Image (cartoon, rainbow, N blue to C red):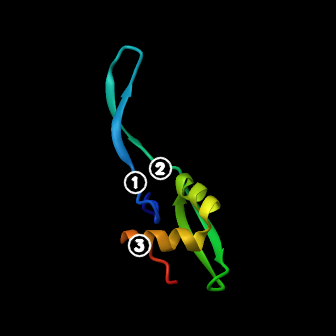
Amino acid sequence: MSKVCQLTGKRPVAGNSVSHSNAKTRRRFLPNLHKKRFFIPETGKWVTLKVSSTALRSINRMGLYAYLKKLERKGVDHGVKL
């Protein structure tokens, strides 16, 4: 299961864990992803998406259909048939 948001494209990034002695070891920062089912009333369909918490907040603010339309205008492939 890939750790990538289907809507925002957020993915893991690499960085350092820094200890008290300032020793650095490599680590990964993972996005805050949730697998969630959404109902799109405009199409009458259920859609399951793996989305980040940032995308969830945008969906709550705008609505899923409007958010997907906005992504289409930007040219983002979200994988949902509207």
Q: How far apart are marks 1 and 3 (CA)?
A: 22 Å
Q: Which of marks 1 and 3 is in front?
A: 3
Dot 1 amino acid type: Arg
- For image coordinates 36% across by 72% down, the residue present is 75
Tell me the SS state at disc 1. loop
- For image coordinates 62% across by 85% down, the residue present is 43
Q: In this view, does 55 lie to the left or right of 9?
A: right
Q: In this view, does 38 lie to the left or right of 68?
A: right
Check if mark 1's residue and mark 2's residue have beta carbons within 8 Å.
yes
Quadrant of residue 58 within the rendered picture: bottom right
Q: Which of marks 3 and 2 is in front?
A: 3
The residue indicated by pointer 1 is 11
- For image coordinates 41% across by 60% down, the residue present is 9
Residue 52 x, y percent position in the rendering: 52, 56
Which mark sits nearer the N-terminus, 1 or 3? 1
Please say if 24 is above or below 46: above
Check if mark 3's residue and mark 2's residue have beta carbons within 8 Å.
no
Residue 5 x, y percent position in the rendering: 46, 60
- For image coordinates 56% across by 53% down, the residue present is 53
Check if mark 1's residue and mark 3's residue have beta carbons within 8 Å.
no
The residue indicated by pointer 2 is 31
Please say if 47 is above or below 13: below
Q: Quadrant of the N terminus?
A: bottom left
Tell me the SS state at disc 3. helix
Dot 2 amino acid type: Pro
Dot 3 amino acid type: Arg
Identify which residue, 33 or 77, lies in the foreground.
Answer: 77
The residue indicated by pointer 3 is 73
